[in-house]
Image (cartoon, grey):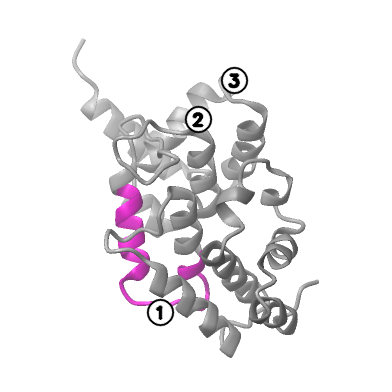
Amino acid sequence: MITVRHIERLFSHHQHPRLYRELIAGRPEASLGGVEAVLARVVPIAALGMIRLDELSQSHTSMYRRLLNVVLTAQQPDGGWGDAMTTALAVRALLGDGGGHGAAPDRGLAHLAGLQKEDGLWPRETLRRMPGDAFASAFVLMQLGDRAAFRRAVRFGDAIAWFTANQRQLDDPTRRLWAHAAVRCRMSPAERHDHESLWRSTRPAA
């Protein structure tokens, strides 16, 4: 099991590829193709480190504050961290038990809400005009689908409805990712009722 000291040693010596591999070991991300090019970079690695330290109840350590500084200083003027996947990971880290990070997570959530397409998906790139991408969207939902702040900020029900309607057409990597995300995205009966009521009220008349 990776420890605070191990994270600090690898990060301080810029052994980012090794640290990335160790941080995702045993996680759903470890079995997915297509994520390393996005996540094996300094900011996503810092976010993964924050998440791991939160899990170890070590958010009070100097290493956590160091990783936090990397994430906070990388936030862009539009509130995001570049692509939707990195933004989702950064926001998840900031919403962890070591919270209290000011407006940064709210700005990140607002950025994700602004990127969301009419069908409920998110684009893989940071540009709003790009088409929605099922893999990137499943990743966003896997990172944040269980967070109440995320559900309030975005059109959560629309994203779930898209995957429910299209899951048979997903490629294998996206299907595996969505299987993990779906566990975190379970809606309570009240949430399902609210979403169905909203859908009926906004559906065009026949």
Please rate how many residues cluster around mark 2, counting C-alpha atoms within 10 Å: few if below 14, some from 14 to 19, many from 20. Answer: many
Span of residues in magenta: 93-113
- Residue 180, percent from left and from top: 64, 43
Kind of residue sitting beneath label 2: Phe
Specify which label sits upstream in the sequence, 1 or 3: 1
For residue 24, side relative to residue 79 (left or right) = right
Residue at 62%, 26% in the rendered image? 171
Quarter the C terminus occupies: top left
Q: Which residue is mark 1?
A: 100
Mark-to-mark CA distance, 1 and 2: 33 Å
Residue at 46%, 70% in the rendered image? 94
- Residue 205, percent from left and from top: 18, 15
Q: Which residue is mark 3?
A: 168
Give the structural element (helix, strand or loop) at label 1. Answer: loop
Specify which label sits upstream in the sequence, 1 or 2: 1
Vertical placement of 13 versus 96: above or below? below
In this view, which residue lies farthest toward the right? 1
Residue at 68%, 62% in the rendered image? 20
Q: Are marks 2 and 3 in contact (CB under 8 Å)?
A: no
Q: Which residue is mark 2?
A: 163
For residue 86, side relative to residue 45 (left or right) = left
Specify which label sits upstream in the sequence, 2 or 3: 2
Mark-to-mark CA distance, 2 and 3: 9 Å
Mark-to-mark CA distance, 1 and 3: 40 Å
Vertical placement of 133 versus 76: above or below? above
Q: Is residue 102 magenta?
A: yes
In this view, which residue lies farthest toward the front? 14
The foreground one among 165 and 28 is 28
Give the structural element (helix, strand or loop) at label 2. Answer: helix
